[in-house]
Image: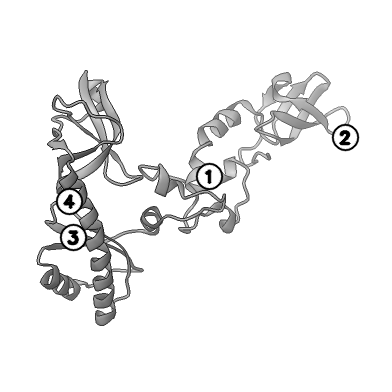
């Protein structure tokens, strides 16, 4: 077992493990740590905890110190400078007539680097822009092209559900989402109804997918031949969530379908895999 704390550098970013180094650190504390980008200030989202060794990648970097008032003042100053850098960069983008959309500017805690995040339809030659920015800020400049999902995560907003974007509030990583999930959940395949504000498939399609996969395994698909208390028949409609099936009985094909629960039938033939479920 190894003692760790979890630190996050953005509101909905990844959680990174660090060794507390004998410090008793509480949830919500700010700490100064060393990362691949240099010295950074992050917020503790997991207090001192013992975890299995296989859950971490060793060796863990150790917490340098709890953030002081001076460190917190430095953070506030960085936020102020980021706004000014954003304005200046936009002016330079317009000057060079670059087809790019500036999304966010980020100063590293120690001011050794400024990162400019942008979106663009294709590759951008921003070498002259970098030269201008380096001449103004006198520090390392890095421009990063990001996708529309990352843009939504940074900027935030409200989804069609009326709630703040999941990616901007609690999702650490983007999970793979496919059109197959929408099909299996019986959703309309209209792009406007299953796409988020970013234009990509909604992240929330992932949330219930495992439950739907379990229900699909135990629910006779449309076209399956089943044995019911009233006799054999063919499933013409099913509801994954309630488990209710509509079955046309062999002995009365012209009669109204039998409504029966999946637990009360036995599958005799699986039916065509091409048939989908209806919710």
Residue visible at 83% across and 21% down in the picture: 230
Q: Which residue is mark 2?
A: 256
Task: Give the answer, above or below, for where 162 lies relative to 61.
Answer: below
Residue 30 in the figure: left or right of residue 171: left
Residue visible at 14% across and 34% down in the picture: 61
Report, in whole angstroms, how far the alpha carbon at label 2 lies from the one at label 4: 71 Å
Report, in whole angstroms, how far the alpha carbon at label 3 lies from the one at label 2: 70 Å
Residue visible at 74% across and 31% down in the picture: 245
State the colouring used for the structure image: one colour
Q: Which residue is mark 4?
A: 109
Quarter of the picture holding the N terminus: top left
Q: Nearer the viewer, residue 194 or 154?
A: 154
Q: Earlier in the sequence, mark 1 or mark 3?
A: 3
Q: Closer to us: mark 3 or mark 2?
A: 3
Q: Which residue is mark 1?
A: 180
Q: Position of residue 75 (x, y in %)?
A: 22, 51
Quarter of the picture holding the C terminus: top right
Q: Position of residue 191 (x, y in %)?
A: 56, 57
Residue 246 in the figure: left or right of residue 201: right
Determine whether the residue tagged by mark 3 lies in a helix, strand or loop: strand
Dot 3 surroundings within 10 Å: few (below 14), some, or many (20 or more)? many
> Furthest-front residue in view?
69
Q: Earlier in the sequence, mark 2 or mark 4?
A: 4
Q: Position of residue 106 (x, y in %)?
A: 24, 57
Q: Which mark is residue 114?
A: 3
Q: Earlier in the sequence, mark 2 or mark 1?
A: 1
Dot 4 surroundings within 10 Å: few (below 14), some, or many (20 or more)? many
Residue 111 in the figure: left or right of residue 203: left
Count all numbered tags in the image, as a single digit.
Answer: 4
Q: Position of residue 262 (x, y in %)?
A: 70, 24
Task: Give the answer, above or below, for where 231 lies relative to 190.
Answer: above
């Amino acid at each position: 077992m190894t003692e760790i704390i979890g630190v996050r550098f953005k509101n909905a970013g990844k959680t990174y493990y660090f060794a507390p180094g004998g410090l008793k650190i509480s949830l919500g504390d700010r700490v100064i740590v060393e990362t691949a980008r240099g010295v950074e200030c992050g917020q503790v989202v997991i207090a001192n905890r013992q975890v299995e060794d296989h859950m971490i990648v060793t060796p863990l970097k150790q917490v340098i110190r709890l953030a002081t008032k001076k460190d917190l003042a430095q953070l506030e100053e960085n936020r102020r400078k980021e706004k000014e850098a954003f304005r200046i960069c936009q002016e330079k983008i317009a000057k060079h007539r670059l087809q790019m959309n500036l999304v966010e500017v980020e100063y590293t805690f120690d001011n050794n680097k400024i990162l400019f995040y942008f979106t663009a339809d294709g590759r951008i030659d921003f070498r002259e822009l970098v030269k201008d920015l380096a001449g103004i800020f006198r520090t390392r400049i890095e421009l990063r092209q990001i996708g529309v999902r990352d843009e939504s995560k940074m900027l935030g907003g409200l989804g069609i559900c009326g709630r703040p974007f999941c990616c901007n509030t609690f999702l650490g990583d983007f999970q793979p989402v496919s059109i197959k999930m929408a099909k299996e959940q019986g959703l309309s395949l209209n792009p406007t109804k299953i796409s988020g504000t970013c234009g990509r498939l909604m992240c929330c399609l992932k949330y219930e997918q495992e439950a739907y996969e379990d229900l699909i395994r135990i629910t006779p698909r449309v076209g399956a031949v089943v044995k019911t208390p009233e006799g054999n028949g063919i499933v013409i409609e099913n509801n994954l969530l309630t488990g209710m099936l509509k079955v046309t009985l062999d002995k009365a094909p012209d009669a109204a379908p039998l409504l029966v629960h999946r637990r009360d039938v036995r599958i005799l033939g699986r039916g065509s895999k091409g048939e989908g479920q209806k919710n």
